Image (cartoon, rainbow, N blue to C red):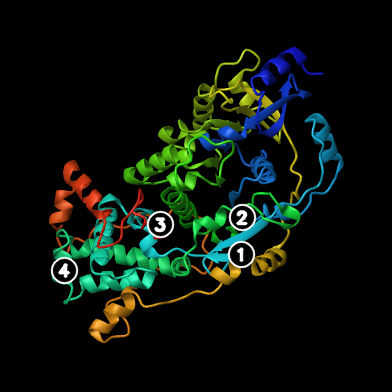
Amino acid sequence: MADQGAAAEIAAGYATEAGALELGTVVVDGAADPAARVRIPFATLNRHGLVAGATGTGKTKTLQNLAEQCSAAGVPVLLADVKGDLSGLARPGEASDRVTQRATETGDDWTPTAFPVQFLSLGGEGIGVPVRATITAFGPILLAKVLGLNETQESTLGLIFHWADQQGLALLDTKDLRSVIQHLLSDEGKAELKGIGGVSASTAGVILRALVNLEARGGEQFFGEPEFDPADLLVVEPDGRFRGMGRVTLLELADQQSDPTLFSTFLMWLLAELFEDLPEAGDVEKPKLVFFFDEAHLLFSDASKAFLDRIEQTVKLIRSKGVGVFFCTQQPTDVPNDVLSQLGARVQHALRAFTPDDQKALTRTARTYPKSRVYDIEESLTSLGTGEALVTVLSERGAPTPVAWTRLRAPRSLMAAIGEPAVTEAAHASPLWAAYGTAVDRESAYEKLSARTGATSAPGTPPAEPVPPRQAPQQAPPQAPPPAEDEGPGFFEKAMANPMVRSFFRSAASAAGREISRGLFGTARRRR
């Protein structure tokens, strides 16, 4: 038996008066006390959180458990299903000796339960309902992250967006942006290129080649219309057997593993859109949406300072809109300190310390936890079993709870994938299919510029870099090469050496152009 006195003392820090999400029970000296509950108050979920741990330690099942309880409480959820094994949320779980044992240890009245799930996929080639964003809505800062541009190229792209906004040229898909850059590089457009800040043709050419390479990787499938409305994530089931439950949205990403930066940046676009669209909510009894950001390290890897600053600002401010954000990654050190400091809940699965760098990360992680008289934090982090975690959250009064070695509850839905045919069938039966299932290609920048020249396509498309038929997964797209040496740097590149000038141009790049106003990431604000 566990030391019930120590377990009860820790559990007292997790006592709640209002609704709470049940994580599991306290473990002391290797034994769980079913009466010592570890909880996260629903009212503090919009203070955000982190789920971290090495591969195979149970992070996915933790996400499944959190999503189930949010849904049961009427809170919609968005999860990125990177490996394709969260689709079991749509089916009741299966009883087994291990599930029964875990239910006993955690004091859980386990019942197999299915949850309302809608399946989405990026672009038109996945197994879920296709979701797209227009280039204009995505904005220059997020697109620069996808293209792997450096800071100077990012600012140049922003100025090109600003010029297209002023000219009334809608950038709906990649061919629209490609045609705009090609026009600015053409004999007819060179004067306009110089008129938007002295941008050199070589820098615009680098951006164009990066865009064409994105198209060669299949990235053009994501950009276009109909554009996904984030309001479709905020659904509480109105009737039927799931009445009153929050809808679980799974973004199926197994097909996008070869281009992880695209899907991680898309998730950030969704979060930015929610920030711009939702009204202020203040303190809420439970969030309007909980947003689980899996493989979070992909978002921060090789990101520009402007990009990281906007992530920090979005995470800091979106809690007042009633949205909770949970980052999921292997190492807490994958998340920048300024973002990590905004996360109120920590569910830390086991870490491994096989290398000197691993040991340094372990020590740094241990120092971020409150001191404990029951556990040696650093030793505990390497001793946790599968389905166990060190937990600390914010209590109802906003204070950190004691560190709790927690044996986590078993999910009530199926802990396995339901298969592509079942996902495809559910996607086609979804009411969202009628809205997003068929791509639309209306008149935009490509058609308008083609009409000016009387050509069917803009001239001078640079060849894409060779792309193998099946790419291996990559951490991030490579940084685009610097401007070619045959054409010297333009006025803009020289001026970018001055921090004040750089700040000015970044602001100008995201400013309103004609009737288009842009938010934190330069995303076009949705007109209602």
Q: Amino acid at mark 4?
A: Glu
Name the residue carrying label 3. Answer: 146
Q: Residue at x 51, y 44 (%)?
A: 296
Report crowding for label 1: few under 14, some 14 to 19, many 20 or more residues within 10 A (C-alpha): many
Q: Which residue is mark 4?
A: 192
Q: Is residue 172 above or below residue 525?
A: below
Amino acid type, callout 2: Leu
Q: Which residue is mark 2?
A: 250
Instruction: Give the residue type that dot 3 points to.
Output: Val
Q: Which residue type carries mark 1? A: Gly
Q: Position of residue 509 (x, y in %)?
A: 25, 54
Q: How many marks?
A: 4
Which of the labelled discs sits on residue 128, or is there none?
A: 1
Pointer 4: residues within 10 angstroms few (<14), some, or many (20+)? Answer: some
Give the residue furthest to the right. 97
Give the side of residue 268 with respect to residue 150, left or right: right
Write the residue at 13% across / 70% down.
191
